[in-house]
Amino acid sequence: MYTLGMPIGIFVDHRGPRPAVLGGAIFMLFGYFPLHQAYHRGSGSVMLMCLFSYMTGLGGCMAFAAAVKTSALNWPNHRGTATAFPLAAFGLSAFFFSFIGAVFFPGDPSAFLELLAWGTFGLTFGSFFFLKVHHEQAEYEAVPASDETPSIPSTDPQQLRAGSSDEPKPYRSSRAEDEPDIRGLALVRSVSFWHLFVIMAILAGVGLMTINNIGNDAKALWKQYDKNVTDEFLVHRQQMHVSTLSICSFLGRLLSGVGSDFLVNKLHASRLWCLVVACAVFIFAQVCALNIENPQLLGLVSGPSGLAYGFLFGVSPSLVAEMFGVRGLSQNWGFLTMAPVISSNIFNIFYGKIYDQHSVVGPDGERFCSVGLECYRSAYWVTLISCCAGTGITLWAIRHRHNKYLRAMDKGDEED
């Protein structure tokens, strides 16, 4: 899904959100349903299974990008809050479908895949008829290739004229001079973009390491804490931490979206401070992971990790729209979400190497670690240092934006 973000973003920016929603619904249906049939029959081509799995990711990415773009267009003065809701729903969707599957189809993966096929299709296709851009988009002037020519965001909220068409029609407004339109090669030459890209790579990589390995953390601690612990109990505890991560990520996305609008509209501060909060919560989670040996306290790792991960993703689209303009939001956001592709793999591979170094292979060939915290502690030292570096880069980015604002103010005073 990460690698699909940019091409799908270009499609959404050029063709509008509604075609992407319709295409997303179709791709998810024709992705999940063949997987259900293959599981039901017990046979299927591996290459085709890979293709159908790819289609599910493609469909989800299309619908997600369309929802975020529509929210940003319809509520230009509250983009943080508006984009936070689809982001939060996206983060909670796995928990939602898993809960329904566990209640109505326990122990039946085939039925669960059929639920995903019709459930994702029905929800997305049904939304197609209600997805409209109610505010016409202002006409934006292209800016220089570098973002070093600053633009000052308007402090006076201005309502855009309502339109009857689903797609925005450009017209001239004073807002056109306030918002940039940076994308493509101009985005690559933007210092502000690379600030965001590096911050996203570091923090998302740290978060995904815990998200992907919280089950191993729980297993390692419980194996040392209680030698008689059963596999069934371990699975239950692992599922509990996965649910905790999902719910806290949902809450973090909502809080950062609403909080970023409060910072901008009430305190006249930068949305980047939400990333500082994310860094602080991540640091707290890493410190807990380095010290907690009692598995009953592991929620102090999974909970804050999910919250910080949500804070990171909840504010990022509104930051992209604010810095680089809403016209290229989908493709720019898609480019930014490629940041965790490399970093998350690096952190996960490092965690795996540390865990394997402390593991032994049992008589049945299963690898396990019974030394508790030492199974993975070194990995969290690396993530702690990374979070501190991310905090420094975020503060540097805030200073960079503030200096650009001051230069723009000085230039405006000289022209007056």
Image (tube, helix red, strand yellow):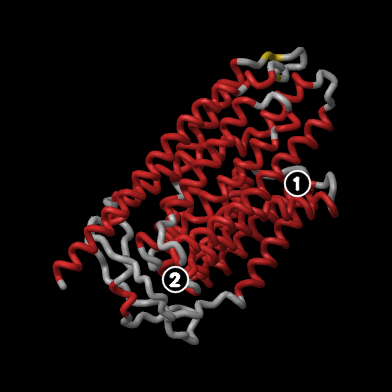
Q: Position of residue 308 (x, y in %)?
A: 56, 45
Left or right: where 56 falls relative to 368: left
The amino acid at mark 1 is: Tyr
Up-down relation of residue 411 to residue 349 (above or below): below
**Residue 152, image x, y percentages:** 30, 65
Which of 392/102 is in front?
392
- Identify whether 235 is placed above or below 32: above
Mark 2 secondary-structure assignment: helix
Where residue 299 appears, as percent x and y from the top left, is: 70, 37
Q: Using the image, determine if residue 9 lies above or below residue 298.
A: below
Q: Residue at x 32, y 81 (%)?
A: 173
Taking the image as shown, residue 268 lies to the left or right of residue 36, namely left
Say which label, 2 or 1, has the lower sequence index: 2
Amino acid type assigned to the residue bearing label 2 in the image? Arg
Q: Residue at x 47, y 58 (%)?
A: 317
Q: Which label is found at residue 15?
A: 2
Q: Which residue is mark 1?
A: 39
Tell me the number on the disc at residue 111.
none
Quadrant location, the C terminus = bottom left
Left or right, 402 with reference to 123: left
Query: Callout 2: few (<14), some (14-19), or many (20+) C-alpha neighbours within 10 Å?
Result: few
